[in-house]
Amino acid sequence: MTTILTKRAATGTLVGLALGDALGFPTEFNDVRSILAKCGPWREMELCTPAVVSDDTQMTLAVGRGLRAAMDRGVLGPEMAEPVRREFIAWNRSPENNRAPGNTCLRACDLLERTDLPWQHASQIGSKGCGANMRVAPVGLVPGLSDEQRAGAAQLQSALTHGHPTALAASDLTARAVRLLLQGAEPGELVGLLRSYALVNRGQYHERWLGDLWTRSHDATPGQFMARGWDECLAVLDRLDDAVRTASPEEDPCLATGAGWIAEEALATGLLCFLQFPDEPLTALRRAACSSGDSDSIACLTGAFAGAHLGADAWPVEWADRIEYGSELVTLGALWDA
């Protein structure tokens, strides 16, 4: 098994995420025919110069900074809500927040500035948009966390903006996938490992991390609240399992596992592109970017999975050196690789 240190998986994950984001950002909101007309054959798509990223990378960095600040104070716990909240507010106020951010994130971040109310009042309980998990990769990269800490942190960072149980479960699964690949899990085993994890955690509500969030839903118990989200994720994992075996890599991946605007479909379609080309990371990114759905979020997740699996050397220097926020991404990755 390749060690985390040898392959610099954290750096590979963050750089891959940003590269996918930058490759997919110009093709978002386009159908495949339009993308091919604009970019040529999908296997030859090139990274723009400059390689500008979307809010996906910006918010990934916000989560990463928040986690780092929380852990500078001691063991990671629910108190991470405050530094991550501050990072989200700073992102929301930034003049660089001009990359077509999602309405749920904007609405929730405005409410997070209300310091007189607990963060649960800002959470958009009905939203399971992919903004919940396109930014969660850093939770999978932090070394030394227990399963409870990693799951709690993944769900909490989602809940600050996207409080739907499927958003929480999909964020947990996304961080879990990154962690499994970083630790050396074989790509062919990944869907089964994620399904087993979902089944074990189906009724688990992390009250220590989420507080009374569930009471803002229509569910009778916290277990029922979470089961609703895990069941939707299990259904999309079934679709993914079938697609890995039957879908043609020459076809739009969104046709098999969804357009990625919602969290569970972003996870599944990002994974599909990675699993179709587990040892060809640039091909995987190009397939994800040439898709009819939320192409930047799909491609950023594909890049995160490929980087966690293959490490930093998966990405050509001529691409990695052009990426926006590249210095901060590498610095943050190096901290966790060490």
Image: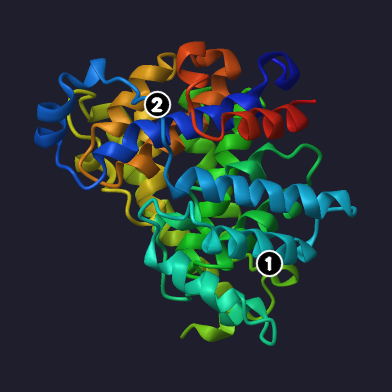
Q: Is residue 41 above or below residue 90?
A: above
Residue 293 horizontal side relative to residue 306, left or right: left
Q: Residue at x 70, y 30 (%)?
A: 331
Mark 1 in CB contact with mark 2 (< 8 angstroms):
no
Amino acid bearing label 2: Leu
Q: Which mark is residue 292?
A: none
User: Is disc 1 surrounded by few (<14), some (14 to 19) or many (20+) residues within 10 Å?
Assistant: some
Q: Quadrant of the C terminus?
A: top right
Mark 1–mark 2 Cα distance, whole angstroms, equals 30 Å
Q: Which mark is residue 206?
A: 1
Q: Quadrant of residue 281?
A: top left
Q: Residue at x 42, y 45 (%)?
A: 54
Q: Quadrant of the N terminus?
A: top right
Q: Position of residue 290 (x, y in %)?
A: 24, 32
Q: Residue at x 67, y 20 (%)?
A: 8
Q: Secondary structure at mark 2?
A: helix
Q: Position of residue 157 (x, y in %)?
A: 61, 59
Q: Residue at x 42, y 52 (%)?
A: 234
Amino acid bearing label 1: His
Closer to the camera in the image, 219 or 93? 93
Q: Position of residue 249 (x, y in %)?
A: 24, 24
Residue 106 horizontal side relative to residue 313, left or right: left
Closer to the camera in the image, 160 or 275? 160
- Which of marks 2 and 1 precedes in the sequence? 1
Q: Is residue 173 visible?
A: no
User: Is disc 2 surrounded by few (<14), some (14 to 19) or many (20+) residues within 10 Å?
Assistant: many
Count of picture labels: 2
Q: Quadrant of residue 113?
A: bottom right
Q: Is residue 91 visible?
A: yes
Residue 282 horizontal side relative to residue 15, left or right: left
Q: Which mark is residue 275?
A: 2
